[in-house]
Image (cartoon, rainbow, N blue to C red):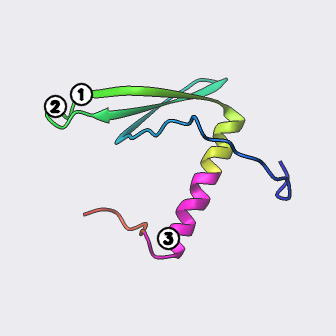
C-alpha cells in the first residue's frame, strides 16, 4: 500500500486484549503469535487467550511497523534501548 493511500478503520466491535507473554510458532507459510497471561501465583503457567495468524509477508510488515514505533519512542525519550538491570 502506498503512503498516500488512506484507510477507513472501523473498530466498533474490536476487543481489547491484555498480554504479558507472547509466543511465536513459525513455519514456512505463516507465523502464529500467541497472546497470553502469565499466572502470578505460578509463573511457569501461561493461559493463552488468543492466536494471531499472519503470512510471512504480513509478519515482516508487522515487525517493521513495531520497529518504527520503538524507534519513535526512543527518539522521544519515552523508552531506552539500555538493557534492564
Closer-to-camera residue (35/83): 35
Measured as percent of width and height from the top left, residue 1 is found at 83, 47
Spatial CA span between label 3 and label 1: 32 Å
Measured as percent of width and height from the top left, residue 54 is found at 63, 30
Q: Is residue 69 left or right of residue 19?
A: right
Q: Residues within 10 Å of mark 3 (few under 14, many from 20)?
A: few
Q: Which residue is mark 3?
A: 74
Q: Residues within 10 Å of mark 1 (few under 14, many from 20)?
A: few
Pick the quarter of the image with the C terminus.
bottom left
Whether 10 is drawn above or below 66: the answer is above
Whether 42 is drawn above or below 12: the answer is above
Spatial CA span between label 2 and label 1: 6 Å
Residue 71 on the magenta segment = yes
Measured as percent of width and height from the top left, residue 63 is found at 60, 47
Q: Is residue 50 left or right of residue 65?
A: left
Measured as percent of width and height from the top left, residue 16 is found at 46, 40
- Residue for point 37% across, 26% down: 48
Q: Residues within 10 Å of mark 2 (few under 14, many from 20)?
A: few
Query: CB of mark 2 within 8 Å of CB of mark 3?
Result: no
Say whether disc 3 or disc 1 marks the residue closer to the N-terminus.
Answer: 1
Q: Report the magenta stretch's main SS.
A: helix
Q: Which residue is mark 2?
A: 42
Q: Secondary structure at mark 1?
A: loop
Closer-to-camera residue (84/14): 14
Question: Which labelled disc corresponds to residue 3?
Answer: none
Quarter of the image for residue 9 reads top right
Query: CB of mark 2 within 8 Å of CB of mark 1?
Result: yes
Q: Which residues are magenta?
A: 65-78
Quarter of the image for residue 83 reads bottom left
Q: Secondary structure at mark 2?
A: loop
Q: Is residue 2 left or right of residue 19?
A: right
Q: Which residue is mark 1?
A: 45
Amino acid at each position: 500500500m502506498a503512503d498516500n493511500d488512506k484507510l477507513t478503520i472501523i473498530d466498533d466491535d474490536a476487543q481489547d486484549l491484555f498480554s504479558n507473554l507472547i509466543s511465536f510458532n513459525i513455519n514456512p507459510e505463516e507465523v502464529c503469535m500467541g497472546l497470553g497471561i502469565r499466572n502470578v501465583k505460578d509463573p511457569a503457567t501461561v493461559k493463552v487467550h488468543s492466536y494471531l495468524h499472519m503470512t510471512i509477508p504480513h509478519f515482516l510488515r508487522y515487525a517493521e511497523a513495531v520497529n518504527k514505533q520503538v524507534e519513535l519512542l526512543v527518539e522521544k525519550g519515552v523508552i531506552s534501548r539500555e538493557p534492564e538491570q
